[in-house]
Amino acid sequence: MIGGVILAAGAGRRYGAVKQLAEFGGRPLLAHAIDAMVAVPAIAPILVVLGSDAAEVAGGVDLCRAEPLVCEDWEEGMAAPLRAGIEALDARGADAAVITLGDQPFITPQIIAGVIDHAGPRRQAVRATYDGRPGHPVLITRPLFASVMELRGDVGARDLLAGANVGHWECGHLGRDDDIDTPDQLEAARP
């Protein structure tokens, strides 16, 4: 079983507003990440990890078949929502988790599916790369779940992945992994 985790818990301080609900392509920014994950039938369940303004975000975006998961200690930094998502998938018996970010509207279903396709029995993780630069999505397998639970503070899984058997899949030809962190970045990314 492969579960999905969409990290969308931050306060968007650099954005200056509820970034997850910012309009992009006629829809909330977060909707793009949800739609991409939901379009991959191999992924279930899909959890959208919310934190800051959780009720407003959950009410302002169509979650489709994704489920909201509120991370109460989201202010700790990136590690807390990641732990919350992995803990919830672990409790449901997931063998792996595909992790994306709620502020990356150009991650396509093809990129997410490709990361899954590049998993194998000897790999603990698979990471998408864009012109050789590591990015998202990232797939981590059950053997790494316990290590994720040890992460603290404003850190993701980068250091954890550096010590694991990670496959890299070049997918820059299928999309981009631009983060939208400021209004200027949002304007520059508009089609």
Image (cartoon, helix red, strand yellow):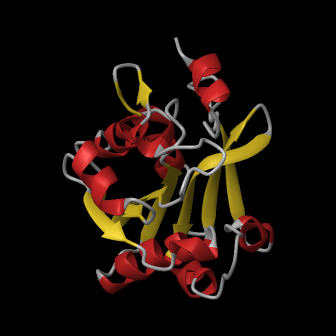
Query: Is the N terminus in the top left, top right, bottom left or bottom right quadrant?
Result: bottom left
For this orientation, the residue located farthest to the front is 16
Q: Quadrant of residue 95?
A: bottom left
Q: How many marks?
A: 0
Q: Say left or right for 55 vs 138.
A: left
For this orientation, the residue located farthest to the left is 65
| On screen, residue 91 above or below 124 | below
Which of the pair 21/62 is nearer the observer? 21
Q: Quadrant of residue 186?
A: top right
* Rendered location of residue 92, percent (x, y): 29, 80
| On screen, residue 22 above or below 118 | above
For this orientation, the residue located farthest to the top is 191
The reply to whether residue 158 is in sight is: yes
| On screen, residue 79 above or below 179 | below
Q: Residue at x 57, y 72 (%)?
A: 75
The reply to whether residue 47 is in sight is: no
* Rendered location of residue 25, percent (x, y): 40, 19
Q: Residue at x 45, y 62 (%)?
A: 52
| On screen, residue 17 above or below 4 | above
Q: Residue at x 19, y 51 (%)?
A: 65
Q: Say left or right for 47 vs 142.
A: left
Which of the pair 95/8 is nearer the observer? 8
Q: Say left or right for 103 vs 184.
A: left
Q: Residue at x 52, y 72 (%)?
A: 74
* Rendered location of residue 83, percent (x, y): 52, 78
